[in-house]
Amino acid sequence: EVQLVESGGGLVQPGGSLRLSCAASGFTFSSYSMNWVRQAPGKGLEWVSYIDSTSYPIYYADSVKGRFTISRDNARNSLYLQMNSLRVEDTAVYYCARDRSNGSYFLFDPWGQGTLVTVSS
Amino acid sequence: DIQMTQSPSSLSASVGDRVTITCRASQSISNYLNWYQQKPGKAPKLLIYGASTLQSGVPSRFSGSGSGTDLTLTISNLQPEDCATYYCQQSYSTLYTFGQGTKLEIK
């Protein structure tokens, strides 16, 4: 079974740092690009970052560029999101999602269950 | 970045109804458009990709259409389990963007 499990969320003060992890299983992780997507409480989905299967290229949403760093360890089947200089507005459930292609189309499938990050003093 | 605007933001319909959700892109995205369904407390689930291709296991009452800047998701013969929030997502650019979501309520 293809599965993604996020961890590392929690409560952090503004200006602090947190590192999220996403453990992948049931597929050849090294063959797939991956993404982080977040959802603030009661709000919609916001794409955060993309990393290619080889770790290049990498893209970020403007809202996190310069503060967040996406990375992966294909030997450990794991995806990471290092979040620095956290702001109250970064409070959200963070999902990892596999970037799957079908022909020329790219889609997110599956998604993990999410991990909650709360930035508050 | 490509902006995605969904309408309506919410709607209420009865079992058996046919509903349509529209997604408008700020520039042409051809048919690089995905639709996701999200139920409360759950992760989003892929419904349709490439604007009109149904993901395996998704009921045939879901359909997608359109190309360019205006694309639609249609749910025919609405069922109680379709109560959810629906999101469009463009995959034309790797700076992926989502619509703001459409909350569907079953009367």
Image: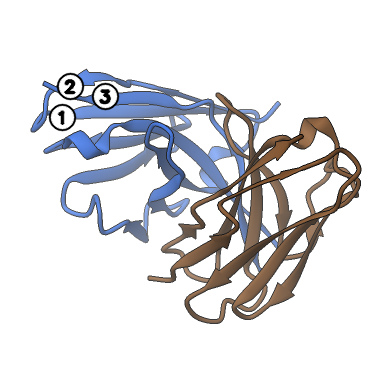
Chain colours: A blue, B brown
Left or right, A56 with respect to A33, comes to: left
| Residue type marked 3 | Thr
Front residue (pair A110, A62): A62
Q: Which residue appears farthest toward the top when viewing the image?
A: A10
Secondary structure of residue under mark 1: loop
Residue labelled with disc 2: A12
Specify the subunit that label 3 lies on.
Answer: A
- Marks 1 and 3, how far apart at CA: 11 Å
Q: Give the residue drawn at x 58%, y 27%.
A: B40
Left or right, B28 with respect to A72, comes to: right
Residue labelled with disc 3: A118
Front residue (pair A69, A13): A13
Front residue (pair A41, A92): A41
| Residue type marked 2 | Val
Instruction: State which tag comes first along the sequence, 2 or 3.
Output: 2
Specify the subunit that label 1 lies on.
Answer: A
Instruction: State which tag comes first along the sequence, 1 or 2.
Output: 2
| Residue type marked 1 | Ser
Residue A71 to residue A50: above or below: above
The C terminus of chain B is located in which quarter? top right
> Would residue A112 be seen by someone viewing this image from the given angle?
yes
Residue labelled with disc 1: A17
Q: Are marks 2 and 3 in contact (CB under 8 Å)?
A: yes
Front residue (pair B65, A99): B65
Indicate which disc residue A114 carries: none
Question: Percent position (x, y) of residue A52?
Answer: 44, 54
The N terminus of chain B is located in which quarter? bottom left
Q: Give the residue drawn at x 17%, y 24%.
A: A120
- Marks 1 and 2, how far apart at CA: 7 Å
Question: Percent position (x, y) of residue B44?
Answer: 60, 38
Left or right, A110 with respect to B13, comes to: left
